[in-house]
Amino acid sequence: MTSSYIRPVASEHVLYVHASSLIDAPIEKVWAVLTDLPAYKEWSAIRSIAVTDSNKNALEDQRLAEGKNIHITINTALTLSDPGVLDGGSAFAVVTKYEPENYCVAWKANSLPSFVLNAERWQILTLDESTGKTRYETHECFDGLLAYYVKFAVGKKIADGFAAAADCLRKRVEESV
């Protein structure tokens, strides 16, 4: 099966953030760690992701699927501790693509109308032919009126967070192989 993922063109968005890492582990192992949401708080710089209902209440079933809501808690200090007052943030999104057979998941912010803020994040795993390692890539595109604020106020923190998340994923998987 071919993934429906098409790499975004950075110049077409107000803010485009990307990070990647090469992970010395089988793609199935990386996917298992990437999609094990309850374990994120143990290793991820993002801090936590939970499948929720529309009121942000965590569901018992934490498996990702298209159409499910997720609540993301962010620590911009990029530590595994709980974020401080100035380091915390959160996002509420809906899973727009979930293709385990293609190692691809995406979600889109859904707390504001898209003309105000339209943000979609993709996470993709592929086999790097030259090294035999798993390549993890993540991209997020921001558009809408608030995207300009996001770009100038926290764009660097988002980019740093994506790089840290890619590295944390690599470390978590490689340490558990």
Image (cartoon, grey):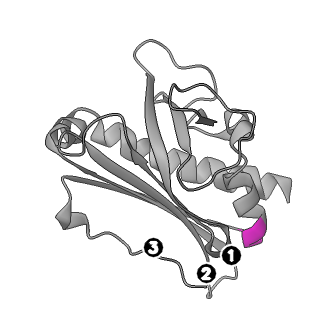
Residue at the outermost right position: 177
Q: Residue at x 55, y 56 (%)?
A: 66
In the drawing, what numbered circle is on residue 154?
none
Q: Amino acid at mark 1?
A: Lys
The x and y percentages for residue 29 are: 78, 63
CB contact under 8 Å: marks 2 and 1: yes
First along the sequence among labels 2 and 3: 3
Q: Nearest the camera: 73 or 176?
A: 73
Q: Is residue 27 magenta?
A: yes
Q: Give left or right: position of 140 versus 42.
A: left
In the drawing, what numbered circle is on residue 128?
2
Q: Residue at x 37, y 53 (%)?
A: 120
Q: Secondary structure at mark 1?
A: loop
The x and y percentages for residue 117 are: 24, 41
Q: Amino acid at mark 3?
A: Tyr
Q: Give left or right: position of 107 versus 40.
A: left
Residue at the outermost top position: 85
In the drawing, what numbered circle is on residue 5?
3
Q: Give left or right: position of 59 versus 159.
A: right
First along the sequence among labels 1 and 3: 3
Q: CA distance from mark 2 to mark 1?
A: 5 Å
The x and y percentages for residue 53 are: 57, 32
Q: Amino acid at mark 2?
A: Asp
Image quarter hosting the N terminus:
bottom right
Of the two numbered discs 1 and 3 in the rendering, the one whose residue sits closer to the viewer: 3
Q: Is residue 74 visible?
A: yes
- The quadrant in which residue 158 appears is top left
Q: Nearest the camera: 155 or 37?
A: 37
Give, as a single range, the part of the protein colored magenta: 24-28
Q: Which residue is mark 1?
A: 133
